[in-house]
Amino acid sequence: MLETVRWLLTAELVGLAAFPIAYAAFPNLSDRAWGFAKPIGLILIGLAVWGLSQAGVLPNDAWAWWLSIVAVAVVGCALVWRRRSELAAFVRRNRTPILVGEALFLAFFIAWTLFRVFDPNISGTEKPMDFMLLNASTAAQAAPPEDPWLSGQSVAYYYFGYWMFAGLGKAAFVKTSVAYNLSLSLVAGMAAGAIFTLAYSMVRRDGGNLRAALLAGAAGSALLLAVSNLTGWWELLANFRLGSHGFFDWLAIDGLERSAQTESWRPTNFWWWWKASRVINTFDESGVGLDFTIQEFPLFSLILGDLHPHVMSIPFVLAGMGVAYNILTSKEEWGFSWVRKNPATVVVLALLIGSAGFINAWDMAFLFAVLLGAVFIRTVRQRGQTAAWPFLSALPLIAIGVAGLLAFYPFYFGTLQTQIQWPPLLPAEFGTRPVHFFTVWAIPFLAAGVFLSTVAFRTLRPQFEWAWGSISGRGEAGGKPEIGPWIIGMAGIGLPYLVWGFTHLEYRDGAENIHLIERLWTVLPLGAAIVFLFVTVMNRARAGKNDAVQFALLLGLMALYLVYWAELLHVHDVFASRMNTVFKFYYQGLIILSAAGAYGLWRWRLMHLKLTRWALGASLAAAAVGIILLAGSLYYSVAASYSKAGEGGGDSLDGIAYIERRTPEEYAAIEFLRENASPGDRMVEAVGGSYSEFGRISGSTGVPTVLGWPGHERQWRGSNELVTPRIADVEELYLTADLETASALANRYGIDYVVVGQREKSKYPALNVEKFDTLGVRVFERNGLTIFCLKAECP
């Protein structure tokens, strides 16, 4: 309990320290970015300790983190000191949205903290990997942290999220096994506060009253963090035996079948809720999956409990979207003069761009695309459409982006290793079945789509009327369209399709020309929607529109484009399929549609006042459908949370307490190394497969072992060059009876501690223990688990 209070208070202090900076950087947000203050504060203090520790100026220690918090507060106060009375007056006038935003933050933080009490175990899936990276960042004396699963090498993964949360744990004096679970809770809370700020500001800008804006902000939090896809409906039907076996065979969601009998109000088979993240697939006649993909959504991620980069990045992505909104709605002319006049915004923007790829590499291009879209729209609004506008308007943003990359120079140009192979893009062999697409996207598309499609129709209606009049010979009624936006929009969807066609014919065995036509028809609806939204945005920009509708249109356009790309192309990574591309693109799309959907729901309600009877009936019918779909989604949210919490078997926030219950000797060994291992010490334990218990002692302590999960190290480093030799060397170290060989191997890897427990004995049955008694001394023994110390001075 005390650790949770310290953690929460420290996070609040970080937010308070950074709020003056957010206030100065986001002048066009109605609450002046109160909901972005915590993520921005974490980036600022994280960068300070990361950069200064790497330069040898400060250690990665608790006092350094507190010094950075104080420094951020001082900078913020200096930034607004001359406007302190203005700031105080603003807070008094806006105390209601600030309090509601903070209440949402606390509500989601507390709710997920309570959930984690019931399900705290850092076990299964990629939790051990995430815990390892959190411990690596905590144990490091300076950046970059040494990889606990590849001793002697720096972490090659994008680790800044772990670094920030590890630093918060240090500052709050919270041990990592508790900080892991509190980090998930904090991500949920910060995401709720961030999307509240964005949706609230959009509604207030367009004339919404306080109540409507507060409700829109709350709706954004719910859409992002409490709503699932439609798998809940299919699970509900299957559980209560509603629907034939043929229906579920046609639905073809792996593992989802009609129950033999109804046993409970929810499915009771183990991890039944997992299927919601594995909806999209294509099966051959024998039932083998050909197009395995992942479609996580934030609620699923929080239930699962993996502290993964795509989860940690949510509030930071939303803050980046907030900068795009701030730029789009600014009245000042965009250009380098804007950069000079808005130093606080520029600095925050640069750090958000620079940190995006360091927190979750997939987010950098996406965030830059959203910002570029906002800049383009502004340029069209201000200067009209010219041949040079896309290039000229991008230059200041590119300069800011380069500055952001340089702020994190040691990572991008030193530590980072990419998985991308040549060619960087490959064709998606399979397209998504309509029923699967509907299952994943129905709710977010409905929430945002009704409003966006209505705006598009109203904006483009004069052009449609002109085209129809020209074709039918009835005269050129309406407004003659500008051909430029239509050409650019069609080029925007044509380019990915042409790349798909070329790579399909070039790299796909058995590819035929007829496939190009077949795939064209499957992606044409998405492509057409993208073109219509793009032309709508450009037409409204030329008309001088400067409202939140433009931003909602931009978000909808980006979401559609992400999905469109995932239907055609995938990043050529180690997975050799579109699995990871669908995973990351869909996740980003869900985040931005949650904000657009919250605003869209408010606009949808307003539209009823101006609709004809027929249109009003259609709108109400769509609302009824949405309520029905939402009911099934919330069924999943409740049932899945209840099931996972019930399976957790926890009673505290300590994520490794289960080890003490199951194998107390291993828990004691972990505690021994935590207390006695010195900075720079290294160890060795048995090497085993990914997603297993192998590497658990090194991962739980941050003391680097020779090799942990080989499969993940291959992914991070793009080859087996460092991995394969170590597998053989660890095996030889445990099995050899030759003292010189064992000593040479121990010296090669700088091994200070050797673990010999049940995993080592099972992996290496002929294990020779006696040599370690000669090479070192036994410093820990309990119930068959021994730790040998090979150092000159042992604890």
Image: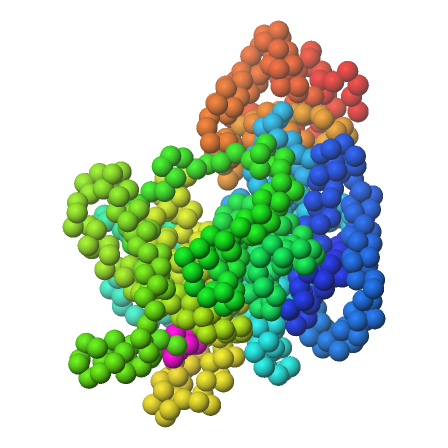
Magenta residues span: 449-458
Which residue is found at the position 56% from the left and 45% from the top?
357
Residue 428 coordinates in the image, percent (x, y): 31, 48
For image coordinates 65% across by 42% down, the residue present is: 407
Where residue 720 sits in the image (x, y, percent)? 46, 26
Residue 355 seen by the camera: no
Quadrant, the N terminus: bottom right
Nearer-the-camera pick, 191 or 652: 191
Q: Residue at the spot x=16%, y=50% of the render?
A: 514
In the shown orientation, is residue 588 left or right of residue 65?
A: left
Residue 480: % across, % down: 31, 75
Residue under the image location 75 percent in, 29 percent down: 679
Report the number of numbered marks: 0
Q: Is residue 179 above or below residue 50?
A: below
Q: How is the image coloured?
A: rainbow
The percent position of residue 386, horizontal first and vertical second, equals: 43, 60
Q: Nearer the viewer, residue 64 or 255?
A: 64
Q: Nearer the viewer, residue 571 or 742?
A: 571
Query: Against 113, is 670 above or below?
Result: above
The front one of 568 and 547 is 547
Q: Quadrant of residue 747?
A: top right
User: Compared with residue 603, is residue 440 higher up or lower down, i.e. above or below?
Assistant: above
Q: Main secondary structure of the magenta part?
A: helix
| Quadrant housing the C terminus | top right
- Left or right: 249 with respect to 176? left
Q: Is residue 606 visible?
A: yes
Indicate yes or no whether the magenta region holds residue 208. Answer: no
Q: Which of the 4 quarters of the picture holds residue 162?
A: top right
Q: Is residue 203 above or below residue 520?
A: below
